[in-house]
Image (tube, rainbow, N blue to C red):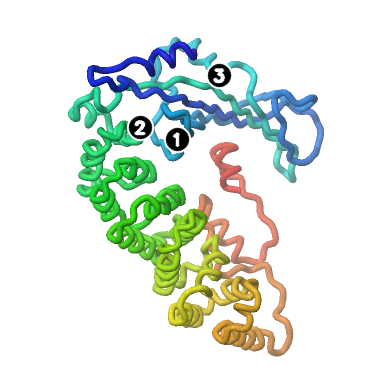
């Protein structure tokens, strides 16, 4: 295998550059199912296939998923965010060879014994390493590249030679401007390799808010690479819009957490000039959309940064919290955990007084009667109507069993 890889990497085109992009890919197959019954009850444990006495045998497979676990690029480094689409069904192997590609023994397994009314489950993971290669961008004309699809173009961008990135990147930016392509971490990482400030600015102008945490972390590296006022301005606008973004529905992504992921990545890189401005933009964005704060997974990080903002920004934050009192308990709890800087701050003391007054009014005449009711509960998943009826009612327990498979049931739980 090594000889094949070395040969492919050594092949050169007329320009003297490598003719192929050669990568390594780790393919993972995940099987979920039911183990052979042993009659034993116990807790969840993790076993490796070579552990003594740890193996379990799969009796029936309910679901099978195959995907790419890791990409290793031509430089030998892990290609985080690499998005070349892959399908195990697209092959030239015989059915028998394709079936045998993963072998019979799993790389690892996880067994879950009986829990309550649920039976035992078993998960198998299989891994196989593969060599993946394709013509380098310089060996193709743009017409061929366009016909290959967006995924292939972005993949070529991430492994292109410096002399090729600008031409390919310009085409991808045009697709972004025409709204024929959505911004991603892989696109931004690839464009940054061109060291072309104008190209990056054009791409950032096409991005209204961060699409995910992966993009947020890549974005945090941009101001460290480019010392550009224009790029920083575009980034700060994206940060503010992300923090201020409203959810379109109850179970949509937590965009405020993306903004905070960006800030934490920026802080870890020590990009001091940008940190203060990013903090102000995040908290300012939150003030215009305070109703989403209580749902944020990183409310503690938000409160810590709000306290470190300018006095007028923190005051606007506290005023917004007062205007939306349903957020007060979680925000106040996070603020009080920050020590004297928060507990002795006049604005935090005022928030605590409001909360104390509310609790006093609610407990006037004695403690409220205990109830299982959760009148404001919202469950957005499948069987939502039935689950919401249960959560908002007096019932203590209820069984839900309308699932299309073990994977659906486990994700739902």
Question: Is residue 225 toward the left or the right of residue 258 in the image?
Answer: left
| Pointers 2 and 1 in contact (C-beta within 8 Å) | yes
The earlier-in-sequence mark between 3 and 2 is 3
Q: Is residue 395 above or below residue 170?
A: below
Percent coordinates x, y for residue 305 in the rendering:
51, 69
Quadrant assignment, res 366: bottom right
Question: 342 or 57: which is nearer to us?
Answer: 342
Alpha-carbon neighbours of circle 3 within 10 Å: few (<14), some, or many (≥20)?
A: some
Q: Which residue is drawn at 27% across and 36% down?
A: 165
- Distance of label 3 from label 1 (alpha carbons): 23 Å
Q: Is residue 51 above or below residue 376?
A: above
Which type of secondary structure does the marked residue at label 1 adopt?
Answer: loop
Which type of secondary structure does the marked residue at label 3 adopt?
Answer: loop
Q: Is residue 190 above or below residue 360?
A: above
Percent coordinates x, y for residue 179 in the rendering:
24, 48
Q: Name the residue under label 3.
A: 102
Q: Which residue is drawn at 61% across and 78% down?
A: 341
Q: Mark 1 points at which residue?
A: 79
Question: Is residue 275 toward the left or the right of residue 354 in the image?
Answer: left
């Amino acid at each position: 295998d090594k000889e094949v890889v070395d040969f492919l990497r050594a092949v050169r085109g007329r320009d003297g550059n490598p003719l192929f992009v050669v990568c390594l890919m780790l393919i993972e197959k995940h099987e979920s199912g039911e183990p052979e019954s042993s009659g034993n009850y116990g807790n969840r444990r993790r076993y490796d296939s070579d552990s003594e006495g740890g193996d379990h045998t799969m009796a029936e497979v309910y679901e099978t998923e195959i995907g790419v676990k890791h990409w290793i690029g031509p430089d030998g480094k892990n290609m985080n965010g690499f998005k070349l689409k892959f399908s195990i069904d697209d092959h030239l192997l015989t059915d028998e060879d394709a079936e045998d590609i993963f072998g019979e023994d799993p790389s690892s397994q996880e067994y879950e014994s009986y829990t309550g009314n649920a039976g035992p489950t078993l998960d198998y993971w299989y891994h196989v390493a593969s060599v993946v290669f394709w013509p380098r961008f310089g060996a193709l004309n743009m017409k061929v590249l366009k016909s290959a699809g967006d995924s292939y173009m972005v993949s070529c961008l991430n492994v292109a030679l410096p002399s090729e990135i600008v031409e390919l990147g310009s085409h991808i930016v045009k697709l972004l401007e025409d709204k024929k392509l959505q911004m991603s971490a892989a696109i931004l990482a690839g464009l940054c390799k061109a060291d072309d400030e104008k190209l990056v600015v054009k791409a950032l102008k096409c991005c209204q808010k961060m699409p995910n945490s992966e993009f947020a972390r890549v974005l945090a590296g941009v101001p460290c690479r480019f010392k550009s006022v224009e790029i920083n301005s575009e980034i700060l606008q994206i940060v503010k819009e992300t923090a201020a973004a409203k959810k379109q529905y109850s179970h949509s992504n937590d965009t405020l957490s993306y903004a905070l992921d960006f800030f934490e990545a920026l802080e870890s890189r020590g990009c001091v000039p940008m940190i203060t401005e990013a903090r102000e933009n995040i908290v300012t964005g939150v003030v215009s959309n305070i109703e989403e704060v209580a749902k944020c997974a990183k409310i503690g990080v938000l409160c810590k940064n709000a306290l470190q903002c300018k006095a007028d920004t923190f005051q606007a934050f506290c005023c917004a919290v007062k205007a939306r009192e349903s957020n007060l308990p979680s925000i106040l709890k996070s603020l009080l955990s920050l020590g004297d800087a928060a507990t002795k701050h006049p604005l935090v003391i005022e928030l605590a007084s409001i909360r104390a007054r509310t609790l006093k009014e609610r407990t006037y005449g004695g403690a409220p009667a205990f109830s299982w009711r959760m009148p404001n509960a919202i469950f957005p998943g499948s069987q939502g109507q039935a689950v919401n009826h249960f959560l908002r009612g007096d019932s203590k327990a209820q069984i839900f069993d309308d699932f299309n498979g073990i994977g659906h049931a486990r994700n739902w739980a």
